[in-house]
Image (cartoon, coloured by chain):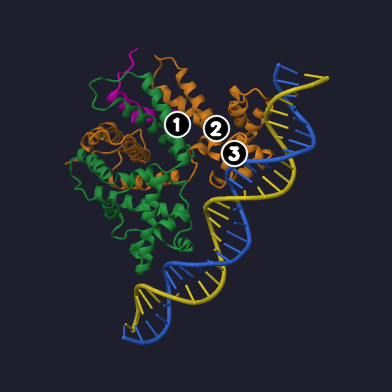
Chain colours: A green, B orange, C yellow, D blue
Amino acid sequence: MPIGRGEQFFLLGEAHIRAMHVRDRRVKRTQNLLAQALLALIAEKGYDAVTIRDITERADIGYATFFRHYRDKDELLRDLADVVINELLELLLGQQPGRDPATVGQLIFRYVADHSAVVRVLLGSRGPASLVQHVIQRGSENVLRQNKPRPDSPVPAEIAAHHLVASSIALIQWWIEHDMPYAPERMGEIYRQLIVQPTLTSAFIIDPE
Amino acid sequence: MPIGRGEQFFLLGEAHIRAMHVRDRRVKRTQNLLAQALLALIAEKGYDAVTIRDITERADIGYATFFRHYRDKDELLRDLADVVINELLELLLGQQPGRDPATVGQLIFRYVADHSAVVRVLLGSRGPASLVQHVIQRGSENVLRQNKPRPDSPVPAEIAAHHLVASSIALIQWWIEHDMPYAPERMGEIYRQLIVQPTLTSAFIIDPE
DNA sequence: ATATTATGATATACTATATATCATAAAGGC
DNA sequence: GCCTTTATGATATATAGTATATCATAATAT
């Protein structure tokens, strides 16, 4: 599904892409065309398959001109992501501090729904990103097989299983990247309190015994 | 830090790599050498920077031979990941069902500690994978800035913040990939129950008002 | 012992990245 | 509005990496 024009221009129309500090209109124009071209192309055939020549042809920009703005594809994508992050943070931080925390979630998911094409592109990017996805997939199936869902739960079992596995991997990732500053026993306790306990009580029947 | 030999052979020594259904010793040998070479090279300079020629030279295998076994780098990496997944699942499923759920976390983190080099390689792979990492990083900083940590909490604020953001992204990812089957309001409620509530009560002082 | 098959070495076509150069056109400062 | 500055387009080119084909040789399985 191609990205709707309206959505594109809401997100990129006001020249957010690096344009904050850019004076020359030509630069603004070029960078916007490149960003929109990349976005459309990822949606069509995935990030990895997109070449820089693809981007410049779609944007109708000279090939060499690309490198006058970005070192490589990743840098352009990163710029694109920054737009989304900033918009979302602005949306969340613009809230009154006393506001009902229940609505924060709604705000997030409404924003995502309104920009689903872009978010899909940014989250679904590529290779070993999809390796982690593959691990989550396999893990989730296993959790569902091992646990009995609670019929009255407001949290669907499928979501709970996905959350359980994805959160576990994220926690492992944090631990590894910070050079394992806490002992496995301590991490096990944190893991239980932050992830296992809430997930099980929300969506699954706690194994007796 | 290069990967220790002992660790390598514990993980790959028994010819797990596709070798289950392989009869010819030469095939087994080749695939193991390629897997070990990739693992070492990723640790040295990152997945993206590793070329197939690098791999075959390190493994001391003919360049063309690589393609007789794998279509590309990703396929080799995926095979490598399967070994880890299977080992970890075996470890967790081998547990008695009546066993204390608190120890499950310890088992996971002990396994990770014992294979940290490999896990680091598999989780830290590359580009837009690191784009998501970048988003998590920025989001976490924001959460820490906005919330007051609870001094007596067994869960460090830094971990809680990371968990909050990483879980949010994972939930969004599930929703997007399943074509948004629930309304944003419903997702907001799930989000609150599964992620916000447990994280805040574990590690942060709930905002009064 | 023999037939089978994986490997090494080599050649080659192809795709994509990245940089350099120069004429042209568009922009901004005044 | 004029003039200087600068971004762009077009083109050429060097380089790196992927992917496939071929053939002699060596290891393997039966």
Residue A194 within the magenta-colored segment of the rendering: yes
Q: Residue at x 37, y 59 (%)?
A: A33
Say few, some or many: other residues with alpha carbon within 10 Å of mark 3 (under 14 / 14 to 19 / 20 or more): many
- Whether pointer 3 and pointer 1 mark residues with C-beta atoms closer than 8 Å, the reply is no
Q: Which residue occupies the foreground of this view, A81 or A201?
A: A81
Q: Is residue B3 left or right of residue B130?
A: right
Front residue of D12 and B7: D12
Query: Separation of disc 2 and disc 3 at Cα?
Result: 9 Å
Q: Is residue D10 left or right of residue A158?
A: right
Q: Which residue is mark 2?
A: B80
Residue A198 falls left or right of residue C3: left
Dot placed on the residue nearer the N-terminal end, 2 or 3: 3
Answer whether labels 2 and 3 touch (C-beta < 8 Å): yes
Cα separation, mark 1 vs mark 2, equals 12 Å
Query: Residue at (63%, 30%) from the top-left corner?
Result: B6
Q: Are marks 1 and 2 in contact (CB under 8 Å)?
A: no
Local SS, label 1: helix
**Callout 1, which amino acid?**
Val
Of residues D4 and B97, the one nearer the viewer is: D4
**Secondary structure under the numbered disc 2 in the rendered image:** helix
Q: Where are the magenta residues, as a range? A: A183-209
Q: Are marks 2 and 3 on the same chain?
A: yes
| Percent x, y of residue B45 | 57, 46
Circle 1 sits on which residue?
Answer: A135
Image location of residue B133, percent across then percent down: 41, 44
Alpha carbons under labels 3 and 1: distance apart: 19 Å
- Main SS, magenta region, reads helix
Amino acid under disc 2: Leu
- Mark 2 belongs to which subunit? B
Find disc 3 in the rendering and name its residue: B38
Q: Is A62 covered by the magenta stretch?
A: no
